[in-house]
Amino acid sequence: MRSILGGILICLSEFLVAQTSKDITRPNILVLLADDLGIGDVGCFGNSSISTPNIDRLCNEGLKLTHHMSASAVCTPSRASFLTGRYPLRTGLTGDVNTPPVIVYTSARSGLPSNETTWATVLQNIGYQTAAFGKWHLGWDEDWRGDQNHGPLGHGFQYFFGLPFTLVDGMELNTPFLTYSGWRQAGNPLHDRMMAAFLAFVVVLAVYNKEFGYTMMVFIIVFFMIGWFFLEHFQFHTDTWWGRSFYMEKLLNSVVMEDRKVYEQPIDLPKLVDQLSNKTLDYLDKVHKSEDPFAIYFAFPNVHTPMVPNKRFRGKSRFGPYGDSILEMDAAIGKILDKLDEMDVADNTLVYFTSDHGSHIDIGTKGGSNGIYPGGKMMCAFEGVIRVPAAIRWPKVIPKGSSSNVLTTLTDFLPTILNVIKTADDSQQIKDLHEKLDGKSYSQLLSNPKAIPKETRMFRHYCGIYLHGLTHETQDGRAFKAYFHQPRLNSQGHCGEICPCFGPDVLNLTQPLIYDKNVDPSEQNPLPEDNEIYQTLLPLVLEEKDKANSEWNPPSQLSSIWSTMPRPWFQPCARFPLCRT
């Protein structure tokens, strides 16, 4: 009898422990990541000219993070850091000398290493239902077609619907295959010699015999076709060897995938956001039937170029396609938030909204606003590209209408999630993960937004593999920005579409520039070198610089032509050879 009673008590205690751990519990998680959205483009961050009621709703019903930072000025490294909680150069997904700044082909071999742990992997391992929608841009297949070692299915997501790559300008064009513009560009190594080759053929045909002449003709035709193809559609012979024509941009990268299958090719741009949001709603209907929590990562293609919003939003803003695309994104966010209300799960769903980096101000009306902060996309460590809008709503925990100016970053999301889910996993894998993270948890801010840091913090700002600056936050919450390198800017504060990370157009400062971000957030007046605060901070920032430069990190994956260029046998293709749905 005692053994039976004892067994009942043991079972009951295990049940209560399980129920308690489930109730402490684990919230649902919804991540909404904008692309190229500036902090000055959002209503709750001061913009009164573009309506963003649903993003504003997250600010009003949750916690607004006013000092939230990205780890990079461009897409791929920023997203790698966000998913892994580590600086982007730890993954090898940063640019170097004479490399592209990001992954440039869907079928390239480069990508997020399979040995990296993402927050999705952690959540999947403890029973979350995980899914990713929208833009990935962290690589796809590595060793065999469909392995997705670099893709979402290889990094903790059980379902994916979206873009394995990103949007690029060629996707909205219908450029013909047979063109001659690239072939005729100055410096083309074959164009200038082609006429001489044909003249040589005529001479050979006349002087020697017809058989040899015809052989030469076939050779020249084959030579011409191969030369034309590579010189017209690729740029191997130039400094930007990874470049391609608009035709190839669309053919090789314009695809929507569902898990490992091609769903749409090429992308129907005006319908894209509707497709992504509707698939998300369908997924929510599916997971709502389960008792397990869900974690959804929705990475918007908005407001990256090309901006081709649905006709419902065209002309609805005062800022052309850019403003219209923001309206489209905000409306999609509203649909998803309304779905959470309908499912009655909003109270215990942590919704995190932010942008991968600031707006691209160097492209005129196709870019947006970074508010009072200088710089924009691809402008290295400038505040305008790394300070991004962010809001977190979790009604069960976070006080409504709260805000915090404590330094937080996209890199902090993984360590924050580890605290939020209160995992009891003390495995060596989790211990090792904690030790290698660069991000810091801000979970204390969720229940107490007025909390101040318990310790000082240094957050590094890399441009490619090069450390351009860092932000230092003191224990009392004051923040200072140090620059070691800066690109040369023109009189308008720009440097063209892409600012360099190195080379003659980068200023290598003999002494760091240090700004007090609390009184000079727009970084107009650096502290004098004889200032007491400057003298206090100087050894600290130089120590962190030396530490960063002494660390070993893997070489850039983007420096190898074999890892960067497309592999035709891995190319997603709906119906070969047309590759169209």
Image (spheres, grey):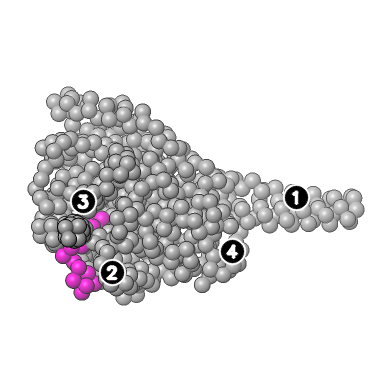
Crowd rating for badge 2 (residues with CA inside 10 Å; few <14, some 14–19, many 20+): few
Residue 489 lies in the magenta stretch: no
Which residue in the protein does label 4 denote?
177
Mark seen at residue 197: 1
- Relative height, residue 483 to residue 184 (above, below): above
Give the mark nearer the N terminus: 4 vs 3.
4
Distance from Cα at disc 3 to Cα at disc 1: 72 Å
Give the mark nearer the N terminus: 3 vs 1.
1
Which residue in the protein does label 2 denote?
290
Distance from Cα at disc 4 to Cα at disc 3: 55 Å
Crowd rating for badge 3 (residues with CA inside 10 Å; few <14, some 14–19, many 20+): few
x and y, in percent, of residue 566 in the image: 54, 53
Q: Is residue 68 left or right of residue 433?
A: left
Mark seen at residue 422: 3
Distance from Cα at disc 4 to Cα at disc 1: 24 Å
Give the mark nearer the N terminus: 4 vs 2.
4
Give the mark nearer the N terminus: 3 vs 2.
2
**Cβ atoms at labels 3 and 2 below 8 Å apart:** no
In the image, what residue type sits under mark 3? Lys
Which residues are drawn in magenta? 339-354
Q: Is residue 472 left or right of residue 78?
A: left
Q: Nearer the viewer, residue 416 or 14?
A: 14
Distance from Cα at disc 3 to Cα at disc 2: 21 Å
Under circle 1, the secondary element is helix
Could you tell me which residue is drawn at 36 percent across and 28 percent down? Answer: 550
Under circle 3, the secondary element is loop
In the image, what residue type sits under mark 4? Phe
